[in-house]
Image (cartoon, rainbow, N blue to C red):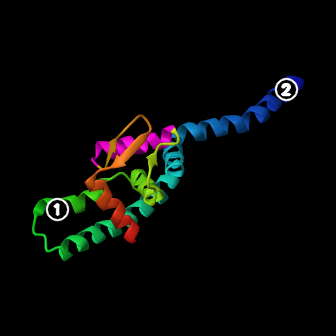
Amino acid sequence: MELANIILEYINVLLWPSITLIAMLTFKTDIENMISKISNIEELSIGSRGLALKMRVAKELIKSEVKSISTDTEKKKESMEVLDIPDNDFLFLEKIFRNTNFYASNNKEKLRYISLSNQGYFSKLSDDEFKPTEKGQKLLGAINIL
């Protein structure tokens, strides 16, 4: 009888961890998907804000080109390129559009400037100093109008 009680105690102790382990293994992919969705919530809010701002800037650039009665398709293409800028880069532009000097104060900013340089919006003057190109000046001007 004492042996039966010891076995019953072991079963009671191991029951809940076993059920938990089985549930985790059974729902492993669902748990991974849920964790990845939770980790992307910040990116989604940045993405929607960035997209809304990009749409407004693209409309502003198109309006300014319509005022100049430009039929040049290359200029219209430039206006729509705004939508291709990554959201984080675009939000960075929103943060710096009033600057007169464009210095990267940390590595994160430097990476944003380099990304924007690769897209043709900035040119690199020195290791931490950047200058907006003509294309970049138009974009910063459109952000400023908004």
Q: Which residues are magenta?
A: 107-120
Q: Residue at x 14, y 74 (%)?
A: 69
Q: Where, quadrant-wise, is the C terminus in this rendering?
A: bottom left
Q: Position of residue 109 (x, y in %)?
A: 47, 44
Residue matched to label 2: 6
Q: Where, quadrant-wise, is the N terminus in this rendering?
A: top right
Most common SS among magenta residues: helix
Q: Position of residue 122 (x, y in %)?
A: 33, 47
Secondary structure under the numbered disc 2 in the rendered image: helix
Q: Residue at x 42, y 41 (%)?
A: 129
Q: Is residue 63 above or below residue 131?
A: below
Q: Position of residue 35 (x, y in %)?
A: 54, 46
Q: CA distance from mark 1 to mark 2?
A: 82 Å
Q: Residue at x 27, y 47 (%)?
A: 120
Foreground: 18 or 82?
82
The numbered disc on residue 44 is none
Residue 116, magenta (yes or no): yes
Type of amino acid at the residue the image marks with label 2:
Ile
